[in-house]
Amino acid sequence: MKIITVDIGKCNGCRLCELACSLRHVKEFNPAVARIQVIGFDELFCLPVTCFQCESPYCMEICPSGAITKGEAEGVRVSKEKCVGCKMCTLACPFGNIVFSLKEKAAIKCELCDGRPECVLFCPTGALDFREADTAMMYKKAALSEKIKEIYEGTAFMREKR
């Protein structure tokens, strides 16, 4: 299965991913309804966050109506027809990557745009990529650990130790 990966060293915080996502799903430029959110950490770095397509999704396990399913090729999906609006999935996701849409009256999350994520297509810096999960996880961990190392080395604590 393919997932969206992030190279936080390349993200410039432009938020085009949010605009592309909202345009595809709700036909308007509205980052508040995008299935991807860019979180800024002061001026240190920006981190686009979306559904991690978990191996054992808590949102799916807790859903009383069976509206959330996971397929090998398409990832974790929400059936708007089966969703009863209880919002238990939003409480179960430890990352906050599934939300309840008042407009759609159902839970919404990134569903990878049916295998062609708009956010990845419109990312001008190449910070977002769509790749196989097995190699993606190694790439994500390496990129994140490198960024954390850079931040740590730039802290006052580390400068005092030198």
Image: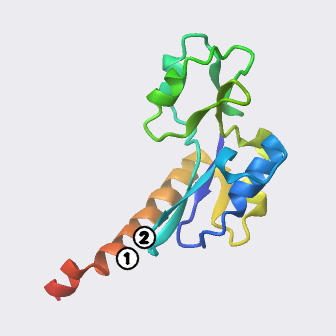
Q: Nearer the viewer, residue 74 or 21?
A: 21
**Residue 133: which disc?**
none
Q: How far apart are the alpha carbons under marks 1 and 2?
A: 5 Å
Residue at which label 1 appears: 150
The answer to whether residue 130 of the structure is visible from this angle is yes
Q: Residue furthest left?
A: 161
Residue found farthest to the front = 102
Are there few (<14), some (14-19), or many (20+) residues within 10 Å of tag 1?
few
Label pair 1/2, CB-CB below 8 angstroms: yes
- Where on the picture, by quarter, is residue 99? top right
Q: Position of residue 91 (x, y in %)?
A: 45, 28
For label 1, the SS is: helix
Which residue is pictured at 51% across the width and 30% down the height? 90
The residue lying at 69 percent from left, 24 percent from top is 105
In front of the other: 37 or 102: 102
Q: What is the x, y in percent for residue 82?
A: 69, 13
Residue name at image x 57 percent, y 35 percent = 98
Query: Against 61, is 44 above or below?
Result: below
Say whether residue 117 is visible.
Answer: no
Q: Residue at x 63, y 22 (%)?
A: 69
In front of the other: 48 or 33: 33
Q: Look at the image and tell me in which quarter the N terminus lies.
A: top right
* Badge 2 density bin: few <14, some 14–19, many ≥20, Cα 10 Å: some
> Disc 2 on helix, strand or loop?
helix
Disc 2 residue type?
Lys
Image x and y of residue 27, in percent: 85, 45
Inspect the image, locate mark 1, and give the three-letter code of the amino acid beneath it: Glu
On residue 147, the disc is 2
